């Protein structure tokens, strides 16, 4: 019996050693890729929360990495390769203009469409708006953001920028990301990161995964290889688009109790945006056109005197239908041509509806 136990123990030890070796090898490979491709030091610890263009944050959940630069080759949905040079400046802003400028100042707040990691600095929709309208632009976005995170960024930097007008980028994932229960049921809009949620008038940091918050947090902060593995598993699960809460929401609309709850939370948060902005004009658009989300954005915007333009994603989609190559490789985010079309649509609205903004000396 003792000999058999020793053999089992030895086999178990060998398996653990093999697993440890494979984990270590994976960590070395991932860190080498990050060093060669992204310039991230090999021995830089994730304990500070930096994951490339994103840094974990105890208040925001995560934020855009400050003073980050990267040059890489991206691919459009149709397979065309193109060079991208992207950077994030002070505070993590993708565009941070001159706060002392006499030009009208526009503060842009959004998520991954404003973060625009597949687009060069001078080709984002907000950089193009600066040229088209001769305005000073300050743009902040981070992939996966919900409305509360956007509001917290807005609140933090409003008095730094002191903008004349605010441009708010909605996206249909906002409603899912604004409600922990919905996000737990989503395979499409759940990145597994701890984020703040607005619940009963207070901010609560919660995990959107059923797995232990501590395990996910440890992986995010300490192992780039395990982070790579769990995020790929999340993407594989997301491929099953039928088994996700968005299907039920799109079938039931406001009759879906969770969606109705998320709409109420989003409305409350945009009311806080309006109160914080004071008399400044707020303009808004969405990254995509889909119901019941678009109608909810129309209602929320009307409730808080926000000019909402729902044709911006339609312009990009129409170009795609005509055969233009307007999307990035993921098929959802815009490539540089998509950003150009969005900027032109936004500039047209701003010229027509806010002429006094552009007539300032």
Image (cartoon, helix red, strand yellow):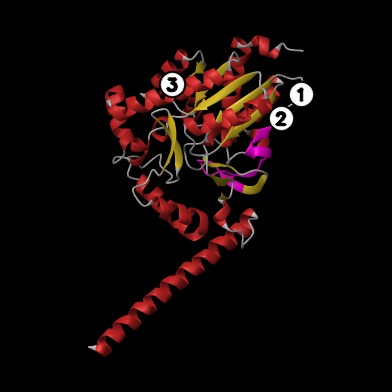
Q: In this rendering, which labeled residue sits more in front, label 3 or label 1?
A: 1
* Outermost residue, left side: 1
SS category of the residue bearing label 3: helix
Per the image, the residue denoted by label 3 is: 297
Residue 325 in sight from this viewpoint? no
Residue 158 drawn at (x, y percent):
62, 26
In the image, 104 versus 78, the foreground residue is 104
1 and 2 marks in contact (CB < 8 Å): yes
Residue 256's mark? none
SS category of the residue bearing label 2: loop
Up the image or down, 280 lies above or below 23; here it is above
Per the image, the residue denoted by label 2 is: 97
On the image, which quarter does residue 184 sit in?
top left
Gap between marks 1 and 2 measured at Cα: 8 Å
Per the image, the residue denoted by label 1 is: 101
In the image, 21 versus 347, the foreground residue is 21
Residue span colored magenta: 73-97
2 and 3 marks in contact (CB < 8 Å): no
Q: Quadrant of the C terminus?
A: top right
SS category of the residue bearing label 1: loop
Residue 99 drawn at (x, y percent):
73, 27
């Amino acid at each position: 019996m003792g000999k058999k136990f020793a053999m089992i123990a030895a086999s178990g030890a060998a398996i653990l050693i093999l697993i440890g070796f494979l984990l270590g090898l994976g960590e070395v490979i991932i860190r080498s890729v990050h060093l060669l491709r992204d310039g991230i030091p090999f021995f830089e610890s994730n304990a500070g929360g930096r994951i490339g263009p994103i840094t974990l944050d105890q208040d925001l959940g995560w934020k855009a990495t400050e003073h980050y630069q990267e040059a890489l080759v991206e691919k459009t949905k149709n397979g065309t390769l193109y060079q991208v040079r992207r950077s994030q400046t002070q505070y993590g802003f993708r565009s941070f203009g001159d706060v002392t400028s006499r030009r009208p100042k526009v503060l842009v707040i959004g998520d991954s469409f404003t973060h625009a990691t597949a687009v060069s600095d001078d080709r984002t929709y907000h950089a193009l708006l600066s040229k088209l309208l001769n305005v000073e632009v300050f743009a902040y976005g981070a992939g996966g953001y919900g409305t509360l995170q956007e509001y917290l960024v807005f609140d933090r930097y409003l008095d730094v920028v002191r903008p004349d007008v605010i441009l708010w980028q909605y996206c249909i994932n906002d409603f899912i990301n604004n409600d922990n229960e919905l996000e737990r049921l989503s395979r499409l809009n759940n990145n597994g990161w701890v984020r703040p949620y607005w619940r009963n008038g207070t901010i609560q940091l919660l995990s959107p995964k059923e797995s232990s918050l501590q395990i996910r947090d440890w992986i995010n902060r300490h192992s780039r290889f395990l982070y790579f593995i769990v995020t790929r598993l999340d993407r594989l699960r997301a491929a099953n688009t039928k088994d996700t809460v968005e299907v039920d929401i799109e079938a039931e609309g406001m009759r879906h109790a969770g969606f109705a709850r998320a709409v109420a939370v989003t409305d409350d948060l945009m009311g806080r945006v309006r109160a914080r902005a004071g008399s400044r004009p707020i303009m808004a658009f969405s990254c995509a056109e889909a119901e019941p989300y678009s109608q909810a954005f129309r209602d929320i915007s009307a409730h808080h005197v926000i000019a909402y333009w729902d044709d911006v994603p339609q312009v990009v989609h129409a170009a795609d239908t005509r055969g233009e190559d307007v999307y990035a490789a993921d098929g959802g985010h815009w490539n540089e041509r998509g950003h150009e079309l969005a900027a032109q649509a936004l500039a047209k609205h701003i010229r027509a509806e806010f002429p006094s903004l552009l007539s300032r000396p």
